Every structure is written in structure tokens, then in C-alpha cells.
Amino acid sequence: MKGQPAPELNIVQWFNTTTPLDLKSLRGKVVVLHTFQMLCPGCVQHGLPQTQKISRLFAAQDVVVIGIHTVFEHHAAMSPVSLEAFIHEYGLRFPIGVDRAGEGHAIPQTMAAYKLRGTPSLVLIDRQGIIRHHSIGAEDDMQIGAEIALLLAEKNSGQEAAQ
Amino acid sequence: MKGQPAPELNIVQWFNTTTPLDLKSLRGKVVVLHTFQMLCPGCVQHGLPQTQKISRLFAAQDVVVIGIHTVFEHHAAMSPVSLEAFIHEYGLRFPIGVDRAGEGHAIPQTMAAYKLRGTPSLVLIDRQGIIRHHSIGAEDDMQIGAEIALLLAEKNSGQEAAQ
Amino acid sequence: MKGQPAPELNIVQWFNTTTPLDLKSLRGKVVVLHTFQMLCPGCVQHGLPQTQKISRLFAAQDVVVIGIHTVFEHHAAMSPVSLEAFIHEYGLRFPIGVDRAGEGHAIPQTMAAYKLRGTPSLVLIDRQGIIRHHSIGAEDDMQIGAEIALLLAEKNSGQEAAQ
Amino acid sequence: MKGQPAPELNIVQWFNTTTPLDLKSLRGKVVVLHTFQMLCPGCVQHGLPQTQKISRLFAAQDVVVIGIHTVFEHHAAMSPVSLEAFIHEYGLRFPIGVDRAGEGHAIPQTMAAYKLRGTPSLVLIDRQGIIRHHSIGAEDDMQIGAEIALLLAEKNSGQEAAQ
């Protein structure tokens, strides 16, 4: 998916935001998508703390951090009711959307559109809405900090056109 | 509760054991009770991995490790259906019982009988069924290893009587 | 020192490089200076592993990582003979220079020129030779990765002039 | 060496104790010997912090913790002058002896007597002066805590004789 336009999110319910988020209206900003499942140990131990750290570190800059709960197994065990308590107990502060269930299969729709193979996954989207990073598993803090900073350093072509 | 006889467990459902456990039939062994909630970060990050380690380290000896899911908040979020997936995803192998809900209050019955104030909690019960350690929060591995070993080193008075 | 030109290094002996390094000839590159003492626990546990990671992560880019052994206490205990064994045992691969002893005081000369107050310290120097980061103590990996990346993203004014 | 009487220590210089230690006068106590080199990363990162923890945890009991600096490589780099600064900087509080250099070979004499193959190594000696644990490399906190506790729980045969 690297180099391709980021598909729009398909979310049934949001936490930690009063207004639903969509990628189109975030054009011009760097978007960090972290997809997870609340009962995935790698997400709890590494992915979510790292995402929380990204959201704090780049809070004052043009970075929007979004978590997506992409449940593809144990669906009954990870309902939005359980997710809400999970978000509260782990003190997650960034916006988190519940991915829309797949029709006739276990993989939810945003996860399928992004061709993600599991959790945790990380997707970085540049100011033009293009996917620049697309990975599964643990990511190194220093590497991710550098990648986000480089995307931030890229000029916003929309702004350039306006100048 | 230290120095007092350990109250019997009050469990509605067991995982990781084909037969229900009760303390009376474990007399003569050292019992390690770890009480937790599946959405309690301190349990997931520290208490449960430590309990798993205890169960591996003392597997060949007279030690019985028991987890008890003492849900006292977010009850709908931590149902047995969610717990079962949690146990599977985190690879927990020791017997885990679901504490019986309290009647008219949030605290479940075994948790109340042991006067536990939250999760994670750790209770060590000696070969005679007496509570010897009763604490809440993170415990040090070396300290707990030493305490369990000292309880193991105590003679079983029942065996002594038989000799 | 932030915003000021980086003083030249004053080094009596180099390890891990066949030719001495000087900042003037590194103009156009981003320079990461890590100052340490081999018997400083914070350096061994955090600063040096982080510096090693920086040198690996940015190896293919315009980043030069330099360690400087700025001994300001226990001078007899941290001689170059001991440092050489330390570098070998810890597998450090980036160039490391021994700071020139101060004349009549404990603080060595490069450390004094940079007004560093202790170890570990981290200095980031941009492509123009200007100090952009100047700190003592533990630094966060994600933050440092982002700062180095932003310095890399800055155009080299020399190159601009040539275009 | 397990099951054999512990050879006497052969120490040229002590730190953190005003009187030299010898095993014979420690009979009746459990002795924890940790052998290390100050430039051995595994000692610094794991072995010495664990030994420090043992000395704190069992401080009020019949446990004597002794560190031995068994230099078998980089001898010039790890002189007693360097060791003294190392002990100070890392805040080590337990008695540490410098092993006597070997005659005509690199291995020092206590290390040779105990047939130790490197650092870090851990030796546990029971109340009768018998070696009960003899290992090289990282040891698990819980396992070591349990082993020391079991040695503590063993009666002192000298005391038994007196009863």
C-alpha cells in the first residue's frame, strides 16, 4: 500500500472525540493510524504505549494520531462496551474508532481496505493523503520519531499553491 | 488477614482445569492465590506474568497456583466470554476461577471474604491453610520466590503425624 | 550554547577511526556529539546504547556520530587504556575521542568549550555548524530521532548556493 | 563443584569492609559469592544489580554477600584504582575482594580454585561450607531468591549439635 492514496476510514463508533474524524478533512496534516485489538498482547505492551507517546510528543504540531479497533477474532470478547472500559483503564487519550464489521467475513472493513494482516499495525499518511509507512508488529521509537518528523518537514503542497 | 485461616473460594466458573479446585482438598500444599481483573494494567503488565512465572518455577513442587478473576468494576466489560479470550491470547496456563458476584454490591464474594482492596493482589497460604502473605500491588520476584520457598520448607504437620 | 557555532573538538587520541575528526571538515553534515565517562552509570545504561542506535539508524544518511570521553573525575581510573577495553567489551563502533585534559583544573577542554555540566550529555550540530540541541541526562529515543530527522531535512546552504 | 567444600578465598585487597573476610569464619551462614569484572557488560547490567538486591533483601538474615573481582582479561584496564571508582559510581555496598593474580597465567587464583569459566558467575555456599549452586551467566531473581531461602531454612548442624 506504500505510495498509494490512503482509503477513507469506515468507523461505527468513536471514543475520545466529540466529532467523527475522516481523512479527507485532515489533508494537510500528517496522520498516524495505529490499528489494534484490546486483547492483543503486542498492542497492549508496545503498540498502544508507543502511539500514546507519539500523540504527546507531536501534540503541538501538524500530526493527528488515530487508533482503530480492528477486531478480527474473539469478536464477542472485544465489544465496544469492553473497549470503552479498556480505554479508560489504560488512560488512552487519542481518538479511537471502532472499525466497521466485515460483511460475511471476520476482517473489518477499514482493516481490509488497508490490506492489514493483523495487529498491531502502523500506517503513516503524509500531508497529501498518501500512505508512506505500512507495517505490522513492533516498531522502534527512534525510527518512527524520525519518519514522522520527515513527513512533517515536507511542505504542504496545498499551502504552497495558496502562497 | 495474615495468620488467619484462608476462607474457602467461591467460584462460578473455572478455566484451565477440568475439576473445580477448593482449598480444603489442597491442604498440605502451598497455595498461591493471584486475584486480578483482565482490564487492570498492573495485573497485565506485572501481576499475571509473575504468577505465570511462579507456576512454571515451582511446577514440580508442592505449590498450587490459582488465579481468581475478581471483577469489582466495569462488570459488563469483563464477562467470562471476554476473560476466556484474554486467557487464550495471553497464554495463561494456571487454573483461573471467576469469583462469584456480590449480592447487592460490586465486590465479588471471594474478594470480600479475603478483604482484598483491589487488583492485583497476592495471597500465600501455607500447608496448614493459614494465610501468610496478603498484599496489593506489585511484588518483587526475588522476595516472592524466597517467601514461597520458605513455606515449602515448612514441614507438613499432617505428614509428620502420619510418620 | 544553543544557536551558537559549535567550538572545534580538542582531542588527544581517537578510537574507531583511522583519521582524526574535526568539525570544520564535517560542515554540511548533521553531527551528533555524545559526551560520556566510562564509569558513569547513566552513560553505560542509557546514553551509549542510544548513541549506538543513532549511529546504526542514520548510518546511510548525512549524520556523523562522535563520542567524546570527557573525564572530569576519577581521572586515574578512566585512562585511555581502560577506555580501550571498555569500547571493546561494549562493542561500541562509532568514533570516540579522548578529550584533552584541562590545564590546572579537572574539566577537560572540549567539555569546557561546550559548557557541559556533566555526563551523559548530547549535542546536535546542524549542517551549518550551529549547535541546535545541548542537554545533560537521559534523552527520549523518539524525541531525538525526530530532532535529528528535522536537521537532516534542512537544506544544506552550501548545496543551495551550488544549485 | 556442586556438593564439594567451598575453597577458601584468596584476596589481595578488600573494599566495603574494614576486616578481611574468609569462609571459615562464616561457617553457619549462607554465603553468596558473585564474581565479576568491572568491564563485563553482563555483570554491570544484570549480575551486580541482582547481587545488590540480594544483599538488601536478606540483610537481616544469616546471609553474607561477597563480590569478587576476578579479572582474567584486560588486566591493565581493570586495576584496583579503576575498581574503586567503579564501586563508588555504581553505589555498590557489599564487601568486594580483588582476586589474587594467577602465577604465569591470566586466570586469578580464587576463580581457578572454583573452576569458574567467566563472568558473571554465582556461587551459593550452605551453612556447612558446601557449594550448592555454581553457575555462569544471568540468573533469574525468583529462582535465586527461592534457592537462598531454602539454604536459610536448612538447620545449622553446629546448632543442632549444641541442642
Image (spheres, coloured by chain):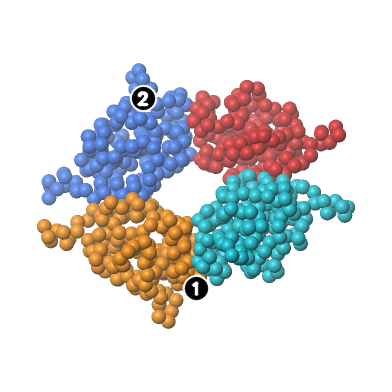
Chain colours: A orange, B cyan, C blue, D red
Q: Is residue C30 left or right of residue D62?
A: left
Name the residue: 40% across, 80% down: A103
Residue furthest to the top in view is C104
> Quick one: which residue is furthest to the bottom in this view?
A104
As drawn, D90 above or below B149 = above
Quarter of the image holding residue D52? top right
State left or right for residue C93 relative to residue B57: left
Name above or below for residue D67 compared with residue A37: above
Residue D80, compared with residue A55, is above or below; it is: above
Q: Residue at x 30, y 29 (%)?
A: C115
Residue C105 x/y as whole percent: 36, 20
In the image: residue B63, left or right of residue C141: right
Tell me the chain of label 1: A
Per the image, label 1 sits on a secondary structure element best described as helix
Chain letter of disc 2?
C
Quarter of image, res B37: bottom right
Q: A98 and A18: which one is in front?
A: A18
Residue highlighted by disc 2: C107
Tag 1: Cα neighbours inside 10 Å, few (<14), some, or many (≥20)?
A: few
Query: Foreground residue, C42 or A19?
Result: A19
| Dot 2 amino acid type | Ile
Q: Which residue is mark 1?
A: A76
Which residue occupies 62% across, 58% down? B111
Mark 2 and mark 1: Cα distance apart in space: 64 Å
User: In the image, which disc is placed on residue B126?
Assistant: none
Element on which disc 2 rests: loop
How many numbered marks appear?
Answer: 2
Give amino acid for label 1.
Ala
